[in-house]
Image: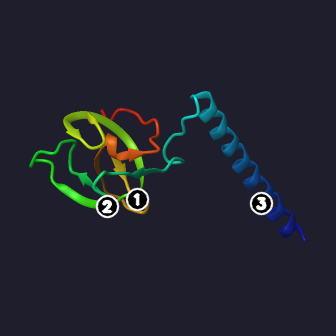
Amino acid sequence: MRFRSYRKAALLAALSVAALVASATATRASAQGGYTFWPAHSSYTNSPSGWTNIRSCGNTSSRCYIIRSVPNDTSIYMRCWINDGWAYGWHWTNRWFYVTLPGHAWGGYVHASLVRNQARVPHCG
């Protein structure tokens, strides 16, 4: 009987912590003007060609090789941003995001104009 009481107490404690975390996340998002922060925020690739290149660095030069190409609407997590090589996707910019794909440990750089549903992330430096 005592074991059930401990299990109930542990379950209630876990649920209380989960509710507090959810509340704090919502409060932080609203305090920051509606922005959400990684990892609770998923962004998506969106390229005029239908495919987005994930690169080894923030540039289209040959020194920044393509790690992988992913189709539009691929879910990505934005980790941070850098300003590097100018490029054109939907518009000209030199902003690049370091991203990871859900379930993958590796990451790479994606041109900012090819990311929709962008999150506020820190500078990579």
Residue positioned most to the bottom:
1
Whether tag 1 and tag 2 are in contact, CB under 8 A, the answer is yes
Instruction: Give the residue type at disc 1.
Output: Thr
Seen in the picture, residue 20 relative to 3 is either above or below; the reply is above
Mark closer to the observer (3, 2): 2
Q: Secondary structure at mark 3?
A: helix
Q: Secondary structure at mark 2?
A: strand
Seen in the picture, residue 111 relative to 28 is either above or below; the reply is below
Q: CA distance from mark 3 to mark 1?
A: 36 Å
Instruction: Give the residue type at disc 2.
Output: Val
Residue positioned most to the right:
1
The residue where tag 1 is placed is 74
Instruction: Give the residue type at disc 3.
Output: Leu
Relative image position of residue 96 (x, y in whole percent): 29, 39
Q: Is residue 50 left or right of residue 41?
A: left
Q: Is residue 2 left or right of residue 84?
A: right
Q: CA distance from mark 1 to mark 2?
A: 7 Å
Mark closer to the observer (3, 1): 1
The dot on residue 70 is 2
Task: Determine the residue positioned at 25% across, 54% down.
Answer: 53
The residue where tag 3 is placed is 11
Relative image position of residue 63 (x, y in whole percent): 10, 47
Task: Determine the residue positioned at 27% across, 53% down.
Answer: 54
Q: Is residue 58 left or right of residue 33?
A: left
